[in-house]
Amino acid sequence: MSSQELDLRDYFQIVRKRLWLIFSIVVLVCGITGVYSLYIKNPVYEASTKIIVNQTPTQSAAGQLDLNQINTNIQLINTYKEIIKTPAILDIVTKDYPQFNITAEELLKKVNVSSVNNTQVMTLVVRDNSYQRAAEIVNAISLVFKDEIPSLFNVENVSILNEAKVNPLVEPGPVEPNVLLNMAIAFIVSLMIGLGIAFLLEYMDDTLKTEADIEKYLGLPTIAMITRLGQEESKQGAAQPQTSTSRKAGDLEHVTASK
């Protein structure tokens, strides 16, 4: 138990000894992260639409509730999620909406499709440096997807629940960068780096600094110690020879008697 307590004390001493280094690394990394997140990183906005895979028109007109058809629609969700991100949809978007000035490959990087398990609803999300542009793109993809599904599957079972508002009264804030999250991650990472460097420097330092180190590693007792003098003590020591040499030759302190 005592050895464990000693080890913990040693770790604490190392941290306290290198505290200035750890603190400097944390401040530097957090400062760089904050400047990058606030002034360098471009903000990213997010706009989304919701698409429902519902019953076919004939079933809706008949007023039937076919559970098998609903389950089939749910299974189709995974297929539709992949179709949205294929050239069969994105190429048409880039062709019909040339004002976006974007290629299908670039558009694919902006699109994300998700769904809740056991539901017939898909969420289509687009991220861009402009919220208005993101809303226009996500609406365009949703409309093209709705128009193209009948020709691909010979069935009309896709409807748009809601479109993204291109000009909302209050424009949503950016989803990236998340300054608080970035700062928290930077603090944890920089703290780990600082502690690692401190322990590494201590591990590589093989000099003997205390009497306990001499006795521990050399097995020898300490006979004498040479202390380091401060500036004031050094000045006092340098002044003593001057005062002793300033005495007159006739002083009794400099007279010796011989037989």
Image: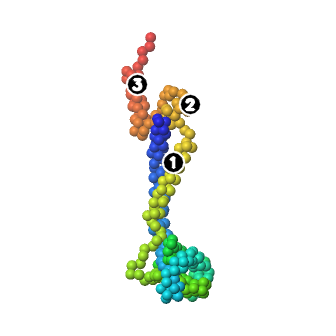
| Image location of residue 38, percent across then percent down | 45, 68
**Residue shown at the point (51%, 27%) measured from the top left:** 221
For the residues labelled 1 and 2, the Cα–Cα distance comes to: 25 Å
The residue mark sitting in front, 3 or 1, is 1
Q: Is residue 239 left or right of residue 136?
A: left
* SS for callout 1: helix
Q: What amino acid type should be assigned to the residue bearing mark 2?
A: Leu
Label annotation for residue 249: 3
SS of the residue at dot 3? loop
Label 1, on which residue?
198
Which one is in front, 237 or 145? 145
Q: In terms of secondary structure, where does tag 2 sit?
A: loop
The quadrant in which residue 148 appears is: bottom right
Residue topped by disc 2: 218
Q: Amino acid at mark 1?
A: Ala
Task: Pick out the residue farthest to the top.
Answer: 259
